[in-house]
Image (cartoon, rainbow, N blue to C red):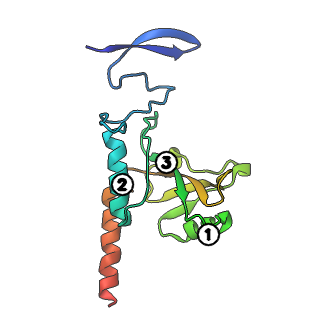
Amino acid sequence: MSNKCKSFFAFKLSETECTAFAHQIALNVIPHIDVPLDNGYTKEEMKMVNETAKIMDTNFAISATCVRVPVLRSHSESITITFESHIEVDVEKCRKVLADFENVTVLDDMSKNEYPMPIIATDTDETYVGRIRKDLFDNNILHIWGVADQVRVGAATNAVRIAQKWIKLEENV
């Protein structure tokens, strides 16, 4: 049994069949990926929280709202990092540190319309970050926008990269 969805195409509101998602995906954003859990998050959101803690080998505060958008590939994330209260964010230093990471490309010039977008990340091995800015109200909070091809730079790829680094470190001991 399919849902009827209100669709807005060619400036006309009409009803269409929704079969792949609960709502129309074209020209829309759906803040719901995977099944809802008792804690108010979805299974995909909790997967992101748990995988991040596992990859970073630490248990720090992280929260996510996963949103389905009409792009073929590449995940996008709005990231907020809260540093210890005595640390004031230095945006230029953060840009430099991020630019020095292997497989990270900083695209961060709003005046030239240069910022990460899924279409740029698709079919690449890079993680693109931009829109790097200090929070308006707390000097110890940094906001970043990031995109990466989820097939080529997904959790499995990151696990392989970490393993390769570990092997290289062990060889140098």
Whether residue 151 is visible? no
Q: Which residue is label 3 attached to? A: 77
Looking at this view, name the residue that lies furthest to the left: 1
Residue 111 visible in the picture: yes
For residue 154, the mark is 2
Q: Can you give x and y, in whole percent of width and height, for residue 59 in the image? A: 37, 61
Q: Residue at x 52, y 52 (%)?
A: 79
Q: Secondary structure at mark 1?
A: helix
Q: Are marks 1 and 3 in contact (CB under 8 Å)?
A: no
Label 1 belongs to which residue? 96
Quadrant of the drawing holding the N terminus: top left
Q: Earlier in the sequence, mark 2 or mark 3?
A: 3
Crowdedness of circle 2 by 10 Å Cα count: few (<14), some, many (20+)? Answer: some
Query: SS of the residue at dot 2?
Result: loop
The amino acid pointed to by label 2 is Gly
Viewer-side residue, 32 vs 86: 86
Tell me the amino acid under the disc marked 1: Lys
Image point (50%, 27%), residue name? 28
